[in-house]
Image (cartoon, rainbow, N blue to C red):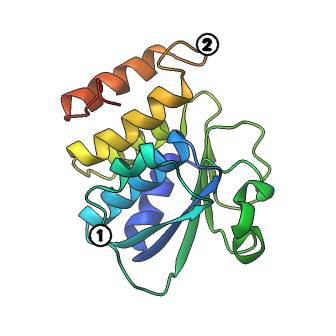
C-alpha cells in the first residue's frame, strides 16, 4: 500500500482507535499520540489504546489529546510488528486491525492494509510523512511526539539506522517547536 492511500483512508474515517505495542516505547507512543493529535486537529474522533503502562517520562506526549468517547469504526496499529506485541490487547484486537503502519521489515501482524517502510529509522518518520501528505499542520505537541520517537529509535541519532532523512525530519520538527533539548 502506498502512503497516499493510507492518507486517503484516514481522511475518510471518523472514529479511529490507534493501538500501540506492549511495553510502549518512545516510537510507538510518539507515533500513536502524534497521529491521534493530527487526526483530532482535522475533526476526527481518535484515541490511543495502550498495551501496558507507559513510563511516566512519556506523560507529556498526551498534552493536547482530547479524551473522546465513541464507538470505533476503524482500528489501526503503529509500530506493532507482530500479534504477540499487542500484549493484553492481542485477544481483543488482533483480528480487528484494519491498518498497520510500521518500520519493521519483519512485520508479521498479517493486516491486509499495511504500510511498512523498513528504510525508516522509526515509525514516527512515517507518521511525519503521512501527516504532511494529509496537509495537517505540525503543531508543537505533534512535533514533540514525533521527535520523541525519532530520537529514541535512533539512540539519539547514534544508531546505524539514522539517515540523512532522519536528520531532515528532526530539523523540521525542531522548526515546528519540538522541545528537543528536553526530549
Residue ID at (31%, 63%): 65
Left or right? Give the position of 58 relative to 105: left
Where disc 1 sits, the SS reads: loop
The residue carrying mark 1 is 66
Where disc 2 sits, the SS reads: loop
Circle 1 packing at 10 Å, graded few (<14), some (14-19), many (20+), is: some
Left or right? Give the position of 76 relative to 107: left
Residue ID at (33%, 53%): 134
Q: Out of 48 and 100, give the one closest to the viewer.
A: 48
Q: Residue 122: which numbered mark, if any?
A: none
Left or right? Give the position of 24 relative to 57: right
Answer whether residue 42 is visible to the viewer in this image.
yes
The tally of labels here is 2
Circle 2 packing at 10 Å, graded few (<14), some (14-19), many (20+), is: few
User: Outermost residue toward the front?
Assistant: 56
Q: Residue 160: which numbered mark, if any?
A: 2
Give the x, y percent position of residue 148: 41, 35
Residue ID at (51%, 30%): 152
Amino acid at each position: 500500500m502506498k502512503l497516499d492511500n493510507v492518507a486517503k483512508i484516514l481522511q475518510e474515517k471518523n472514529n479511529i482507535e490507534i493501538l500501540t505495542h506492549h511495553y510502549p516505547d518512545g516510537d510507538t507512543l510518539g507515533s500513536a499520540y502524534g497521529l491521534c493529535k493530527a487526526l483530532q486537529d482535522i475533526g476526527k474522533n481518535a484515541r490511543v489504546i495502550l498495551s501496558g503502562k507507559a513510563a511516566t517520562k512519556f506523560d507529556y506526549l498526551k498534552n493536547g489529546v482530547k479524551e473522546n468517547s465513541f464507538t470505533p469504526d476503524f482500528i489501526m496499529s503503529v509500530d506493532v510488528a507482530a500479534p504477540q506485541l499487542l500484549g493484553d490487547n492481542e485477544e481483543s484486537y488482533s483480528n480487528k486491525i484494519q491498518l498497520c503502519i510500521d518500520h519493521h521489515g519483519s512485520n508479521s501482524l498479517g493486516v491486509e492494509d499495511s504500510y511498512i517502510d523498513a528504510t525508516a529509522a522509526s515509525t514516527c518518520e512515517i507518521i511525519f510523512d503521512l501527516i504532511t501528505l494529509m496537509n495537517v499542520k505540525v503543531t508543537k505537541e505533534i512535533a514533540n511526539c514525533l521527535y520523541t520517537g525519532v530520537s529514541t529509535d535512533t539512540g539519539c541519532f547514534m544508531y546505524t539506522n539514522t539517515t540523512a532523512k532522519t536528520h531532515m525530519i528532526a530539523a523540521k520538527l525542531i522548526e515546528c517547536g519540538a522541545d528537543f533539548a528536553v526530549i
